[in-house]
Image: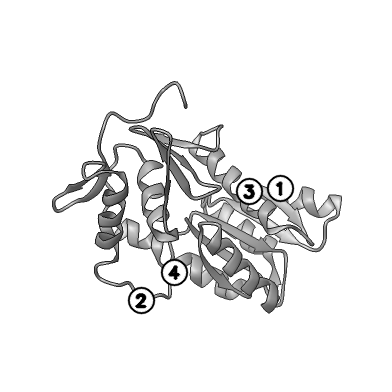
């Protein structure tokens, strides 16, 4: 899950980058409003963590600019100014959630997952497809009572596919989920992860659509679980 972190505190920014990567996100991090706008113009992000107090302006200006442009990117505001007026101003400006400092990384990750569930129209935390129960919070799955574990990048590819059931995702779309906007893309990374996922889930779990990309195969989600 591609994530943009906008935070000017070097230690906190580095900690968030490492911690959220371990939690299954693919984070990029910048330190000011100007760099945030450049990143947003060049990267395909699914969610943003945005500090309000930045050295070259307010995160609220970045937020308002996105909403005025019709951009509905999910945004969680992160700030030390945990006062009622600040929370109300941020939420009324279009933020999806608000978390005051100090905070627990586990809560931040859980709030981000909740924001994304709401955007996808899901109430429950689990994802289901063709006998697989997938837990984004633990980055693990279960088939027929057997636990299946994934690397961070394997899980990122699988989650991208299962969030859009039946859709064909181009290789470039999956690369956008795996790599930061300034990272060099390795030519065969997607193919390697698809191969590893098939080894764990079955050769027919993911289909290759020649010339188009990849999609999940099989009958789909268990309606009783959704």
Q: Earlier in the sequence, mark 1 or mark 3?
A: 1
Q: Nearer the viewer, residue 44 or 218?
A: 218
Residues at marks 2 and 4, CA–CA distance in whole angstroms: 8 Å
- Residue 21 horizontal side relative to residue 181, left or right: right
Give x and y (percent) for residue 19. 60, 64
Q: Which residue is mark 3?
A: 110
Q: Is residue 56 visible?
A: no
Marks 2 & 4, CB-CB < 8 Å contact: no
Residues at marks 1 and 4, CA–CA distance in whole angstroms: 27 Å
- Circle 3 Cα neighbour tier, 10 Å, few/some/many (<14 / 14–19 / ≥20): some
- Circle 4 Cα neighbour tier, 10 Å, few/some/many (<14 / 14–19 / ≥20): many
Q: Residue lying furthest front in this view? A: 146
- Residue depicted at 62% across the width and 60% down the height: 49
Q: Which mark is residue 180?
A: 4
Secondary structure found at label 3: helix
- Residue depicted at 33% across the width and 56% down the height: 173
Q: Is residue 30 above or below residue 93?
A: below
Q: Which residue is mark 2?
A: 184
Marks 1 & 2, CB-CB < 8 Å contact: no
Residues at marks 3 and 4, CA–CA distance in whole angstroms: 22 Å
Marks 3 and 4: which is nearer the front?
Answer: 3
Q: Earlier in the sequence, mark 3 or mark 4?
A: 3
Q: Is residue 215 above or below residue 106?
A: above
Give x and y (percent) for residue 33. 62, 71
- Circle 2 Cα neighbour tier, 10 Å, few/some/many (<14 / 14–19 / ≥20): few
- Residue 223 horizontal side relative to residue 186, left or right: right
Q: Which mark is residue 91?
A: 1
């Amino acid at each position: 899950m591609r994530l943009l972190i906008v935070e000017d505190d070097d230690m906190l920014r580095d900690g968030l980058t490492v911690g959220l990567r371990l939690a299954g996100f693919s984070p990029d991090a910048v330190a000011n409003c100007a760099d945030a706008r450049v990143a947003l113009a060049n990267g395909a992000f699914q969610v943003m963590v945005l500090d309000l107090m930045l050295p070259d302006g307010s995160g609220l200006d970045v937020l308002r600019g996105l909403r005025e442009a019709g951009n509905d990117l999910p945004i969680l505001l992160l700030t030390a100014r945990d006062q009622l007026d600040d929370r109300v101003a941020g939420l009324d400006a279009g933020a999806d959630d608000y978390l005051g400092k100090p905070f627990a990384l586990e809560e931040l990750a859980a709030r981000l997952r909740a924001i994304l569930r709401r955007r996808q129209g899901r109430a429950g935390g689990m994802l289901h497809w063709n006998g697989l129960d997938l837990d984004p919070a633990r980055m693990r799955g279960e088939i027929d009572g057997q636990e299946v574990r994934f690397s961070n990048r394997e899980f990122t590819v699988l989650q991208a596919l299962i969030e859009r059931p039946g859709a064909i995702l181009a290789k470039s779309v999956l690369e956008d989920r795996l790599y930061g906007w300034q990272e060099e893309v390795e030519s065969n990374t997607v193919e390697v992860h698809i191969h590893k996922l098939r080894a764990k889930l079955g050769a027919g779990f993911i289909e290759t659509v020649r010339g188009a990309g990849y999609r999940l195969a099989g009958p789909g989600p268990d309606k009783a679980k959704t």
